[in-house]
Image (spheres, grey):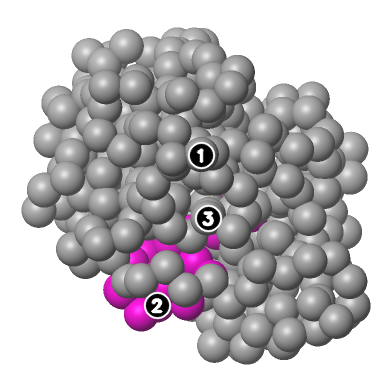
Amino acid sequence: MSLPRHPARPLVAGAPGATGAGPSASEPGADQALGAPGGRPLAAGHPGDAPATPIAHATPGAGAADPLRAALREVLARGVHGLCFSPYLEGQAPGSPVDEAQIAERLAILRPHARWIRSFSCTDGHEQTPRLARAMGLRTMVGAWLGTDAAINEREIAAVIEVGRAGHADIVAVGNEVLLREDLDEDALLGFIRRVQDALPGVPVGTVDAYYLFERHPRIAAACDVVLANCYPFWEGCPREHALAYMQDMVRRTRAAAPGKRLVVSETGWPDRGSPFHGAVPSTEGAIAYFVDTQRWAEAEGVEIFHFAAFDEAWKVGAEGDVGAWWGLWDKDGQPKFTR
C-alpha cells in the first residue's frame, strides 16, 4: 500500500502558521523560515556542503523556461541516482491491484534515466516491482508499507523478506514516514526493523522518515544500517530560490544525527502546479530548477538522492490537496511533462 505522505507537514518553527511536529524553535537549524526578515541561509558555511549555486531563479515566461528545459534534458540524459516509483494508472490508488504489465511499462520509461528506483509496498502486486526492475538492470530500494493495521503490516514484512531472499532488494525500507504519521511507536518500529535485519543479513535495512525525526529518535537512527531521510523544503514553506541551501541543511542535520551512517535522501522534489504552501509556490520553472539544482549538487557531492516523483499521481489530491497530484517528471499517462 502506498502512500499517504505528509498529512501534517510542518512549517519551519517561527514561520507564520507553523503547527504540528516540526522542528522546535530551540532546535538547531529551526530559526526562521528562509526568506523571512533575519532568516539565515541555512547551508552557508557548513562543512561538506557545496556552495548553494542554483541554476536559475526563473520568472515565468518562455525566455526563462528554455534554458531550464535544456538543463533538465542534460541531467536526464546523464541519468540520475534514483526515482520514486508508483505504477498507478488513471483510476487506481493504494489498495488497487497492479499487474506485471503496467509495472513493466512504467519501469521501461524510467530505465534510460535512472540507476535506482524506490518502491513503497510489497502487497497488491507491488512485490513484482523489484524483480522486474532488477531484470531491467535497475537497482532497488524496496519498501514495506507500515501503518495502523497489524495484519497488513505482517503481510508487508513477510513479503519484503521474501523479495530480499530472492535477491531483488539492494536496500529495504521498513516503513515510510511511520513516525511522522504516528502510526507506530518507536519500539514497534524498532521491532520490525530488527526482524527484517535478522532475516536479510546481507541487505542494508532502514526506515524512511522526515529528516528531523532521526534527531528526535536516536535509537531509530542507531538501529538503521542506512538512514533514509525525506527532505522537502516545499513542505516547510521555503521559497524556491532558497530551496537548495535549505535542503543541504536538512542533509547536514541528518548526518549529524547519524554520524558514520550511510545516508540516502529517500525523497525530495517540488510540485509544478497546485496551491502555494506559505512561501513555497508550485510552478513549472520551480519544479525544473529544483530538480536540476539538487541533482547537480548530489552528483558533485556524492549524495544519493531519490527524486519524488517519477509520475504524477492523481489520487494524491485526496491526501495532500490539489498540489499532491503534480510532483512527477512524467504525467499520469507516462508522457514527459517538461521536455516535449
Left or right: where 70 falls relative to 76: right
1 vs 2, front mark? 1
- Disc 3/disc 2 C-alpha distance (Å): 19 Å
Whether residue 147 is situated above or below residue 162 in the rendered picture: above
At label 3, the amino acid type is His
At label 2, the amino acid type is Glu
* Label whose residue precedes the other's in the sequence (1 or 2): 1
Whether residue 34 is situated above or below residue 66 in the rendered picture: above
Q: Which residue is identified by label 1?
A: 37
Asked whether 252 falls inside the magenta stretch, the response is no
* Mark 2 neighbour class, 10 Å CA radius: few under 14, some 14 to 19, many 20 or more: few
x then y, percent, for residue 280: 66, 43
- Disc 1/disc 2 C-alpha distance (Å): 32 Å
At label 1, the amino acid type is Pro
x then y, percent, for residue 33: 50, 36
Quadrant holding the C terminus: bottom right
* Label whose residue precedes the other's in the sequence (3 or 1): 1
State the mark number for residue 299: 2
Q: Which residues are magenta?
A: 293-309
What residue sits 63% from the left and 28% below the top? 4
3 vs 2, front mark? 3
3 vs 1, front mark? 1
For the residue labelled by badge 2, is the local secondary structure a helix, a strand or a loop? helix
Q: Which residue is identified by label 3?
A: 242
For the residue labelled by badge 3, is the local secondary structure a helix, a strand or a loop? helix
Quadrant holding the N terminus: top right
Asked whether 297 falls inside the magenta stretch, the response is yes
State the count of labels.
3
